[in-house]
Amino acid sequence: MTPAARIASAIELVDRIEGSRIPTDALLAEHFRARRFIGSKDRGAIAETVYAYLRRRGQIDWWIERRGWGRVGGTTRARMLGLLLLERGAAPGEIAHLFDDGPYHPRRLDPDEQGIVQALAGQPVDHADQPPWVAGNYPEWLHPRLAEAFGEQVGPEMAALDRPAPLDLRVNLLAGGRDAAVAALARDGIQARPTQWSPLGLRLDKRVALQTVAAWKNGLVEVQDEGSQLVALLLGAAAGMRVVDFCAGAGGKTLAIAAGMANKGQIVACDTSAKRLEGAVLRLRRAGVHNVERRVLESERDRWVKRHAGGFDRVLADAPCTGTGTWRRNPDGRWRLTETDIAELVDLQARILDSCARLVKPGGRLVYATCSILPDENERQVERFLAANAEFAVVPVAAAWPAEVPNPVGDAPFLRLTPAQHGTDGFFAALLERRK
């Protein structure tokens, strides 16, 4: 494909993304499956352009408004011009060459778009006058919540969330150790290094097609962010225990828990989506996991919960959330999120937490976790739960953390991870114990 054809394809994709609730990675995969003629390098270049557009959208809009073109700046084409000019330093002549109405190329610029090109040419994407929500590329209405979470560190934290994430793997102890995984990946030409916090993590600085890699095919490694690995570690599930992964989805944390239990004991992976649970089948089989029972729930108040009340040593509630901690991977999420979304999710999280807590036996432990950085979904959710459930108490992270593993949060009561501080996605986890 020509560079202009790549830009045209990126514009087409962004138009679909901004009119949909389907995640960007899923739309990209669907787009490329339907266009097998697009080669791997072209796919990579198009995807990179799409993600850069989503990451820089706030700054692009700010520049277009600042230079007097706000009345026509809200289109995908206008923002794509902003990306090419502000971040990639394209000159006006190069833009004209890309938007030339050629076969599979974007159509020519109209007079307003030509005005935007002239106004933005030579400008840097960053500027000292940009307010925090512009510099961090997130909606202004979210700023009070993020400032509450991070205080004076909101700038560095949001800058870290604006950078692409590395690819993290978790070593499956049922198939081998971390040294064996490093060696196996090296045989396929992949350089991996141990993660800073997780004793089972490996980090790759560039993305690879793992489906073709022997270490992945034989179940030695699984894709999982380091922060997610630490949430599973906090649960403290040991061999012989009875464990529930209440919002298991496709089973990422279920796999980590099973490996930590050495396949001994029982894990019940629950979800309200049969399709999501079905997605875990091949992963469980590939990893050699055989102590997991999958259970589809009608809702968080399913009768199965009442029948098994007080029957489990450990319960993980990895609750549905805004996903604000995953913006490095899903930058589209910041522009799709609404106040209504937050309110509905906070209500759902409360119902899930109240319901699954019934499964914990006296002396057992519950981990409430999200991949959110918003206090509404995290600390305040736990405060609400504790006020209504006096039989539960917080177990500080340090009191439950394995002595041989570095503690990323010290004496903090909760496991609160961020890209800027820990190099992980944004995660929150609270460990709660039911008094005997």
Image: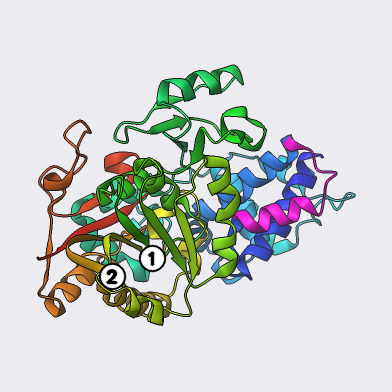
- Among the two numbered marks 1 and 2 on one chain, the one whose residue lies closer to the N terminus: 1
- Does the segment drawn in magenta span residue 39? yes
Image coords of residue 36 (percent x, y):
83, 46
Q: What stretch is highlighted in magenta?
A: 25-40
Residue identified by numbered label 2: 359
Please tell me whether residue 410 is drawn above or below residue 265 in the rendered image.
Answer: above
Q: Is residue 244 left or right of residue 35?
A: left
Question: Do the numbered discs 1 and 2 sit on residues whose CB atoms are within 8 Å?
Answer: yes
Image coords of residue 234 (percent x, y):
25, 48
Tell me the number on the disc at residue 129.
none
**Residue shown at 49% from the left, 30% from the top:** 205
Amino acid carrying mark 2 in the image: Leu
Q: In this view, does 401 lie to the left or right of 273?
A: left
Image coords of residue 425 (percent x, y):
38, 48
**Residue shown at 40% from the left, 77% from the top:** 304
Please tell me whether residue 130 is drawn above or below residue 68 in the rendered image.
Answer: above
Tell me the number on the disc at residue 246.
1
Amino acid carrying mark 1 in the image: Phe
